[in-house]
Amino acid sequence: MAIYDLRCQDGHRFEVIQSFTAPLPDCPYCGAATGKIPSRFALAGRAATPPPPEMMPQTWRGTYGADREYVAGLRRTAEARRDLEERHPELAGDRRPVLAHEGRYEQTPLRAGDPSPSPGSAPP
């Protein structure tokens, strides 16, 4: 048994489940002859892009004490992101090294080349 998408000459579309060898049925709406058309399909699931490097753990504590399986998963995720950015350079973010990412720099990390903040000032 197979599922066929059919269309009549008047443009009515419908699906039918039938044997490969059975003749195509007439249109249930107008009775006209029908023909097979390419199936409309839906993709299940969703495409997931690997997180950017900024979203990966930045400290030892973020790796659950260097749990071997977790770190191996992080490495696979980082490699997948690198491959994605090689194929689509527009997705690559700021590649400058992060100099400070904790404390007052948690929301906006200090990167190499950024102007040096004066003591006591808020980060840019």
Image: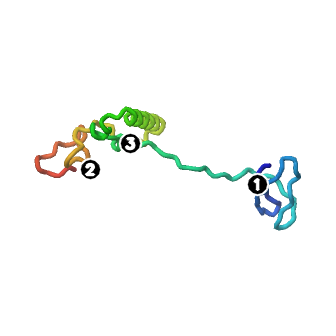
Q: Are marks 3 and 1 in contact (CB under 8 Å)?
A: no
Residue 20 is marked as none
Foreground pick, 32 / 89 = 32
Identify which residue is drawn at 86% across, 58% down.
Answer: 25
The residue where tag 2 is placed is 107
**Amino acid, disc 3:** Pro
Foreground pick, 76 / 85 = 76
Q: Is residue 13 above or below residue 74?
A: below
Q: Position of residue 76 (x, y in %)?
A: 43, 34
Q: Secondary structure at mark 3?
A: loop
Q: Secondary structure at mark 1?
A: strand
Q: Earlier in the sequence, mark 2 or mark 1?
A: 1
Q: Earlier in the sequence, mark 3 or mark 1?
A: 1
Q: Are marks 3 and 2 in contact (CB under 8 Å)?
A: no
The residue where tag 3 is placed is 52
**Amino acid, disc 1:** Asp
**Amino acid, disc 2:** Gln
Q: Is residue 27 left or right of residue 64?
A: right
The residue where tag 1 is placed is 5
Q: Is residue 7 above or below residue 114?
A: below
Q: Position of residue 110 (x, y in %)?
A: 23, 43
Q: Earlier in the sequence, mark 3 or mark 2?
A: 3
Q: Position of residue 38 (x, y in %)?
A: 74, 50
Identify which residue is drawn at 42% across, 36% down.
Answer: 73
Foreground pick, 3 / 85 = 3
Q: Quadrant of residue 95?
A: top left
* Label 2 environment density (alpha carbons within 10 Å; few <14, some 14–19, many ≥20): few
